[in-house]
Each structure stands twice: as structure tokens, then as C-alpha cells.
Image (cartoon, rainbow, N blue to C red):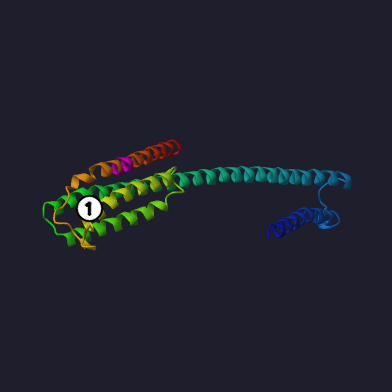
């Protein structure tokens, strides 16, 4: 496509330069156009200077065009680069905000475990309701974790932090499962559900505290990343 444009431009340029020369040469032989004084050499010199001025103007125009075109291209490249950097920064900000929100929601689900067990311990809810609500809470946590896993490429260290959160969470879930939601006692060789006495929910305080503090620390780390990106964006804008 560019080659065709160049060929067309060259043909047009040749045409523009050739037509005046042809007309002048012919005009000098016509009687009705030869009324001006001066011999042939003088007219050739005049028209040579005239055409030289035209060619010089065209050359200057061409140079100015190419210089302007080059500057426009360079400015366009700078603008594109700046826009790409802006979009990349904006994307990171969005990902950090999403990660922070998901971690906070996950931590709220962790913290709700103690309140749920206290309701069961104080007989405000029955075992079946405890199981249903705990299952729903665990499903929510799994859903949050899957979404967080998708943010690993955007948040430094998130993969390692999620693995630690999963380990701490599994330790907490084991206590809840074995002591509350599905407790087991052996009676005459048969596994029987639910002991008569309900353990005090405070037995989960230590693993729950460790889990929620760790998750809150990851939230703080993501928040630091977020603030840095916002500050950088403000400097660039």
C-alpha cells in the first residue's frame, strides 16, 4: 500500500514539473505568446530560475512534511507508551483493590466461626443448623480463595500467602469438624454422632486468632502496594 502511494506521488510530481516546461517551450514558438521582449537564452534563464524556485519550494515542503511527520510519529509513540503505562497501572490498582476486598471478606468468614459456635454452645441454634451455616461459610471461603488464586500473577507474594492461609484454615476446620459439626464417640465398637456435652468454643480462639491476624497482615501488605500505585498514578497524571 505504501509503495503504491509513493509511486502515485512520484508520477504526480513528474507531471507537475513537466507540464510547465512543456508549456513554456511551446509558448516560446507561438506568435501570440511571443510578444514579450527578450531572446531565447534570456527566457530560458528566466524559466530556469522560475522552475528552480518551484522545485526548491517543493523540496523544502517535502522536508518540512517529513520532519513534521517524524515528530508526529515520535509524539504518537510517546503518547501510546504513556497510555499503556497508565492502563497497566490502573489494572494493577483494580487487582489490588479486588485482592484486598476478597481477603477482607475471607477474614470476616473466618471470624464468624466463633460466633456461630457460641450460638450452638448456648443452644440458640441446633446441630443441623450449625452444620448448614458452617457448610455455607466454608463454601464462601473456597469461592473467595479461587478468585484470589486468579490474582496471584498481579500481587507479589500472594501465592505463598494463600498457601499459608490454607494451612492455618485447615487446622481451624479440623477442630470445628471434629469437636462441633461432626463429633464422634465410640460406643460398643460403633461410631456414634454427637457427644452429650458441647465443648467450649473458646478452644478455637488460638488457631482462629493466628489465622485472622495472618490474613489481616496480607491485607495490609496489599494495601501498601495499592497506595504506591495510586501515588505513582497521581505523579504521572
- For residue 35: magenta? no
Q: Residue at x 46, y 47 (%)?
A: 87
Q: Would you say the magenta stretch is mainly helix, strand or loop? A: helix
Q: Residue at x 36, y 41 (%)?
A: 218
Q: Position of residue 170 (x, y in %)?
A: 33, 51
Nearer to us in this view, 151 or 133: 133
Quadrant placement of the N terminus = bottom right
Which residue appears farthest toward the front when viewing the image? 188
Quadrant placement of the C terminus = top left
User: What residue does disc 1 label?
Assistant: 179
Q: Which residues are magenta?
A: 211-216
Q: Position of residue 39 (x, y in %)?
A: 88, 46
Nearer to us in this view, 57 or 11: 11
Q: Residue at x 26, y 59 (%)?
A: 135
Which residue appears farthest toward the left when viewing the image? 123
Q: Is residue 186 left or right of residue 87?
A: left
Q: Is residue 118 left or right of residue 101?
A: left
Amino acid at each position: 500500500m505504501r509503495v503504491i502511494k509513493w509511486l502515485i506521488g512520484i508520477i504526480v510530481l513528474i507531471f507537475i514539473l513537466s507540464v510547465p516546461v512543456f508549456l513554456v517551450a511551446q509558448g516560446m514558438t507561438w506568435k501570440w505568446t511571443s510578444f514579450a521582449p527578450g531572446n531565447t537564452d534570456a527566457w530560458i534563464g528566466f524559466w530556469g530560475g522560475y522552475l528552480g524556485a518551484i522545485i526548491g519550494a517543493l523540496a523544502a515542503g517535502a522536508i518540512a512534511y517529513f520532519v513534521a511527520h517524524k515528530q508526529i510519529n515520535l509524539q504518537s509513540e510517546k503518547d501510546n507508551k504513556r497510555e499503556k503505562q497508565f492502563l497497566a497501572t490502573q489494572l494493577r490498582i483494580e487487582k489490588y483493590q479486588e485482592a484486598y476486598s476478597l481477603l477482607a471478606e475471607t477474614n470476616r468468614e473466618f471470624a464468624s466461626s466463633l460466633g456461630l459456635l457460641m450460638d450452638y454452645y448456648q443452644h440458640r441454634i441446633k446441630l443441623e443448623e450449625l452444620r448448614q451455616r458452617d457448610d455455607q461459610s466454608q463454601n464462601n471461603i473456597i469461592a473467595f480463595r479461587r478468585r484470589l488464586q486468579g490474582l496471584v500473577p498481579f500481587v507479589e507474594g500472594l501465592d505463598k500467602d494463600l498457601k499459608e492461609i490454607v494451612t492455618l484454615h485447615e487446622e481451624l476446620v479440623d477442630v470445628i469438624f471434629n469437636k462441633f459439626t461432626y463429633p464422634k464417640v465410640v460406643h460398643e465398637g460403633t461410631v456414634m454422632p454427637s457427644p452429650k456435652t458441647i465443648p467450649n468454643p473458646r478452644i478455637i480462639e488460638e488457631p482462629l486468632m493466628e489465622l485472622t491476624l495472618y490474613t489481616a497482615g496480607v491485607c495490609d501488605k496489599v494495601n501498601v502496594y495499592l497506595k504506591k500505585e495510586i501515588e505513582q498514578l497521581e505523579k504521572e497524571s
